[in-house]
Image: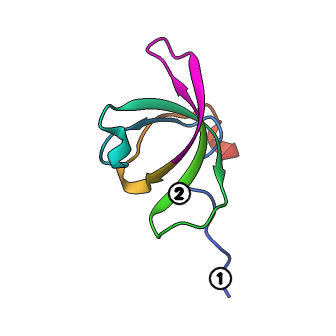
Amino acid sequence: MPAPPGPTFRAGDLLRLSATASVQFLRPITVRVIRELEWDTYDGWVWLDAYELDSRGEAVARRELYVRCEGVQLLDSRLPVCAR
C-alpha cells in the first residue's frame, strides 16, 4: 500500500489567498503558514493554521483556513530547499 501524500504546505510558506482559493477570500489576504492541519477534507482542499499578515508583513490574526490547493498562490517560503 503506498504511503499517504505529505503535506501540501509547510511552516513558513507565505501564501496569497483570493477567491480562487475559496469564496471567503473575495478580498485577498496574505498568510504565513504555521502548519497544515490533518483534518478530513474533500480531495484538493486542506485546512491551514496560519497568521494573517497586514501590508507590512506583521501578523494581525491567527486563523484556521479551509482552502482549495489549486487556488493558493505560493509567494515565498522561509524553509531551505533541503528541509522541504
Image location (x, y in percent) of residue 68:
41, 55
Q: Residue furthest front?
A: 24
**Cα gap from disc 2 to disc 1, whole angstroms:** 20 Å
Quadrant (top left, top right, bottom left, bottom right) of the N terminus: bottom right
Query: Disc 1 marks which amino acid?
Result: Pro
Which label is found at residue 71?
none
Magenta residues (range): 51-65
Badge 1 is on which residue?
Answer: 2
- Which amino acid, mark 2? Val
Is 4 in front, or is 61?
Answer: 61
Vertical placement of 47 versus 73: above or below?
below
Q: Which image quarter: residue 5?
A: bottom right
Residue at the spot 65% in from the left edge and 36% down from the top edge: 80
Which residue is pictured at 45% across the width and 51% down the height?
A: 67
Which disc, if any, is residue 46? 2
Front label number (2 vs 1) = 2
Circle 1 crowding by C-alpha within 10 Å: few under 14, some 14–19, many from 20:
few
